[in-house]
């Protein structure tokens, strides 16, 4: 997996955080750069930490999964992507308060980064620079989440489901690429 693959995975993984950032900004009201930085930092940190944890878990069982790395990567990315697409198709409105303190952000950051744990397991089956990859995913998520706060204050939740749909499609396409060995 090269830089472009990791960057695209980072974009795909960050779409959940992007959607939540939009929802948080709706509760905040007008754009607040401090809150946007805090939101971006929480989501970025967790999206970067989870692949590291997944990599460590995957490394423990890499002998078992390395032979089937393409299939395992496809299955994990497909189900993560399919779940994101399913969420995007729901008509339910999620409500997030304007609080950006640890009690509000920790659950949101954890919930939006669980899929990155699975990606970390996938990374363990490939020769991936995990620290560089985790940092790239964290920075990508930080920037996209920050932009999500800004977009949310300007456009409302018009783009929330589209972001989740796009993220899901990106992850599925990368999974297919890894399955066919391209």
Image (cartoon, grey):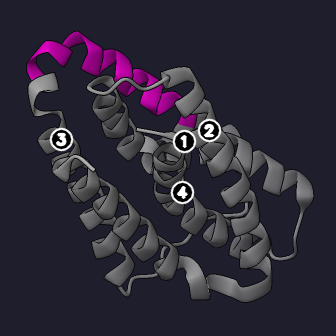
Q: Residues under labels 2 and 4: Cα distance?
A: 10 Å
Percent position of residue 38, x then y: 78, 46
Q: Position of residue 120 (x, y in %)?
A: 37, 31
84 or 179: nearer the viewer = 179
Q: Could you say which quadrant of the image residue 89 lies in?
A: bottom left
Mark 4 crowd level (few <14, some 14–19, many ≥20, 10 Å Cα): many
Q: Are marks 4 and 1 in contact (CB under 8 Å)?
A: no
User: 165 or 158: which is nearer to us?
Assistant: 165
Q: State if disc 1 and disc 2 touch (CB < 8 Å).
A: yes
- Is residue 76 visible to us here? yes
Which of labels 2 and 3 is toward the front? Answer: 3
Q: Which residue is mark 1?
A: 3
- Closer to viewer: mark 4 or mark 1: 1
74 to 24, vertically: above or below:
above
Above or below, 119 relative to 149: above
The residue at the point 28 percent across, 74 percent down is 86
Q: Gap between marks 2 and 1, in whole Å?
A: 9 Å
Q: Which contiguous range is marked in magenta?
A: 48-64
For the stretch drawn in magenta, what is the main secondary structure?
Answer: helix
Label 4 belongs to which residue?
11
Q: Earlier in the sequence, mark 2 or mark 1?
A: 1
Residue in view at x 54 percent, y 41 percent: 3
Q: CA distance from mark 4 to mark 3?
A: 20 Å
Q: In the rendered structure, which disc, 4 or 1, sits on the residue that comes first in sequence?
A: 1
Q: Which residue is mark 2?
A: 136
């Amino acid at each position: 997996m090269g830089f472009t693959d990791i960057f695209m995975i980072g974009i795909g993984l960050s779409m959940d955080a992007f959607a939540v950032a939009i929802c948080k900004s709706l509760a905040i009201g007008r754009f607040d750069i401090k809150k946007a930085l805090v939101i971006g930092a929480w989501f970025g940190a967790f999206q970067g930490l989870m692949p590291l944890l997944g990599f460590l878990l995957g490394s423990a069982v890499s002998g078992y999964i390395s032979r089937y790395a393409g299939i395992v990567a496809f299955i994990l990315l497909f189900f993560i992507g399919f779940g994101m697409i399913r969420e995007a198709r729901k008509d339910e409105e999620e409500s997030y308060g304007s609080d950006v303190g640890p009690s509000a952000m920790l659950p949101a950051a954890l919930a939006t980064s669980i899929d990155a744990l699975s990606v970390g397991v996938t990374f363990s089956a490939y020769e991936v620079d995990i620290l560089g990859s985790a940092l790239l995913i964290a920075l990508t998520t930080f920037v996209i989440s920050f932009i999500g706060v800004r977009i949310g204050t300007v456009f409302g939740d018009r783009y929330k489901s589209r972001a989740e749909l796009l993220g899901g499609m990106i992850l599925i396409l990368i999974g297919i690429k890894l399955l066919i060995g391209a």
